[in-house]
Each structure stands twice: as C-alpha cells, then as structure tokens.
Image: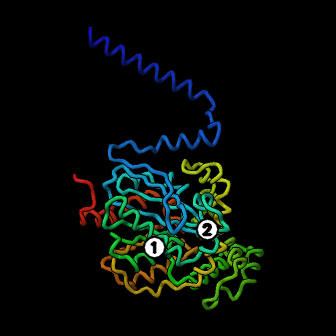
Amino acid sequence: MKTLSLASGLLLAATLCLAAAATAAGQEPVAPASRAEATKIIADMRRIVTDEGVERLEKVHIGGIDQWVSIRGNDRRNPVLLMLHGGPGWVSMPTSWYFQRGWEEYFTVVQWDQRGAGKTYVENDPAAVAPTMTRERMVEDTVEVVAWLRREFGKDRIFVLGQSWGSYLGLELAQRKPQWLHAYIGIGQVTNAPESERRGWAWTLEQARRDGNDEAVAELESLAPYAQGDAPVPLADLMKQRRWLNFYGGMVHNRQGGEAEGAAVRLSPEYSDQDVARIWDANDFSVEHLLTGVLTLDMGRVQRLDCPLLLFLGRHDYNVSSSLAAEWFERVQAPSKRLVWFEDSAHEVMNEEPGKTLLSLVQYARPIAERAGDVPPP
C-alpha cells in the first residue's frame, strides 16, 4: 500500500510538472519590468551564500579621494586577485557579473574603479580630480590599493591581473613591489606602445584594402606616417585608427567593436542609474587625461621581473599587439613565466573566452598560492 501511494505521488508530481511546463511553453516570456528588476535577478543569481564568503561593495580612501571597490568570493581564505581595468576608463566592474562568477570559487576577486573612472568618477568632483590624473598618481593609487588589500585580508601576497591600460599599471607595480605578488597576470599586455600602434594601423589598413573599403583606406592613409617615433599620437588620429581597427575585429574577434560589452554595463547590480548614465563621461575623462601619454611608452624595456609572470594573449588582438607582447615575453626574465594563447579572442579575453580564462587562472595561477600555503585547509 505504501509503495502504491509513493508511485501515485510521483506520478501526480510528474503530471503537475508536465502541465506547468506545457502552460509555460504556451505563454510569452515576461521581460523584467525595469532595470532595477533585471539587475536584482542577476544579483540574486550570483549572490555569495557560502559560510566563509565575502560580498562587499564599498568606498575606500585611496590617494586622497574615495574610490569604489567590489570584493567577492566564496571563501575569504582564498588568495586575493585584484583586477586592474583597461581603458583608461574602460571599467570591468559593471561587466564582471558575466565573466567573473567562476573565479570567485577559487579567488577573492576585487574590482576597482580607478581614479576618474566608473563609480569613482561619479563619487568625486571631476574638476578637483583632473589635476591629479597623471600616470604616476595612478601607479601610486595601485600601490595603495594593494597595500590596503594585504592588510584587510591578512595576506603577504596577492595576485594582480592587469588588462590593457591596467597592464601598464600592473607591470609598474610588479617592478616596484614584487614581494607583494604571488604573480603578475597580464591580459592585452602593453609593451612597446608606439610600435603596437603602428602594427595595429598597418593591419587595419590591410583589412580595409582587402575589403575594398575606400572610406576606411582613405581615412587610414590620411594618418600616415602614423605613430612615428615616440611622440604622442593626436587623440583625433587615434580615434580614427581605432574606429576601423574595431570595425575589423581587432578589439573583439569577429565583432565590430565593444558594443555588446558596453550594453552589458546596464545590467550591472553594482551600478546605480546615475553610475550608468555617467559611465561614458568618465571614460572620455580618463581617455582625455591619460591615453595619448601612455601610448608613448616603451614597457618592452622591462627586462626582468622578480615575481612570476603569466600572460593571457588573444591571438587576434591588434588593439594592443599580442604579437609584440609575445616577443617581449620571450625576452623578459622572471622566476617563472607562462604564456597562454587564446585562439578565439582579440583584446577582451575574459569576455571572449571566459571558460578558458577561468581554467587558466585555476591551472596556472592558483597553484602558486597553494605552494605558498595561501589557500583554505582541505
């Protein structure tokens, strides 16, 4: 009799499930009614619920101003990984909901909106911040953030991952404070910036000629000679080069630029409506103050690092030349180093191949922390 009741109950449950599925299948999907509802859905899906977890969004006083950080991870005893976003001003916090969730199982991941970018831009008066928008101040901010994280989590060493512009900051940090790092990880690594610009321009012109795109060819040829010597490229010329480089997939492979990533910002649970409304003002502010200057630098002069080095390079990256970064990798000396190629990516590796990015972090970065004893007990 009990067996019959159980079977009957299972049959009833299955029937109800099938009926519900059939009803749902016949209905139009209900879209979120507002941005607030959409971001709440994402926030709930990725909420940290583990006993040792950490989920923080807060301001930290860095370099004399309040700057925003997001700190997320399943276990605060995991190694800390600070991501330095690109741009300047191309923040990664508001798209981290897409690419980062898996990282949080193995690392305590910190996203930081740098001076003049994202939420930090909104928090402060741009006119007051403008005089401080220098490369040296940005490097000093980076040092302060890492020092704060080491104190906050009681860590001797952390991982720092620099992407694009952030890879300049990360490489400067790795030279100044190697003893603070388990490893430096570079994505879209800046090396000889003027040569990278020349290679990007030449590749883009080649694509345009092959495509018979007379408009692009004329505009690109009008820039010649492009990025000669180490003089700053005028911002207007740089934007023309980037327009067509992005069009031909030099930033995001087989896409015409970063529109999808830019749109995803609007789904960020960390960002208020005001933050979203002003994010591109912040991006323009950072670009105006920092971009042309950093593109005069030759970071390929760095011959040695005193911490382990990992490079994650997109095979199709012409925004910051991955072939040039690979050449530098062959020359630079480090206690250990590894280059991982992402064959289906350009400049936005973590968004273009998020699975392989996670796998690479777990395979090549986390074991360094394990050997140092910086992981939770088994």
Q: Nearer the viewer, residue 110 or 95?
A: 110
Q: Secondary structure at mark 1?
A: helix
| Extreme residue in the bottom direction | 229
| Amino acid type, callout 2 | Gly
Image position of 297 with respect to 316: above or below: below
Image position of 42 with respect to 247: above or below: above
Residue ID at (51%, 69%)? 63
Residue ID at (74%, 73%)? 213
Instruction: Tell me if residue 256 can be seen.
Output: no
Pointer 1: what residue? 170
Residue ID at (59%, 48%)? 267
Q: Give the color scheme: rainbow, by chain, secondary structure or one colour.
A: rainbow
Residue 150: quadrant of the picture: bottom left
Q: Nearer the viewer, residue 309 or 173?
A: 173
Image position of 51 with respect to 291: above or below: above
Image position, residue 33 (x, y; %): 65, 36
Q: CA distance from mark 1 to mark 2?
A: 26 Å
Disc 1 versus disc 2: nearer the observer: 1
| Amino acid type, callout 1 | Gly
Image position, residue 151 (x, y; %): 35, 62
Q: Nearer the viewer, residue 239 or 94?
A: 94
- Image quadrant holding the N terminus, namely top left
Image position, residue 338 (x, y; %): 36, 74
Which mark, by number, is residue 65? none
Which mark, by number, is residue 249? 2
Instruction: Tell me if residue 303 can be seen.
Output: yes
Q: Secondary structure at mark 2?
A: loop
Return the disc, 1 or 2, that comes first in the chain's sequence: 1
In this rendering, position of residue 191 left or right of residue 229: left
In this rendering, position of residue 203 left or right of residue 41: right
Image position, residue 169 (x, y; %): 49, 74
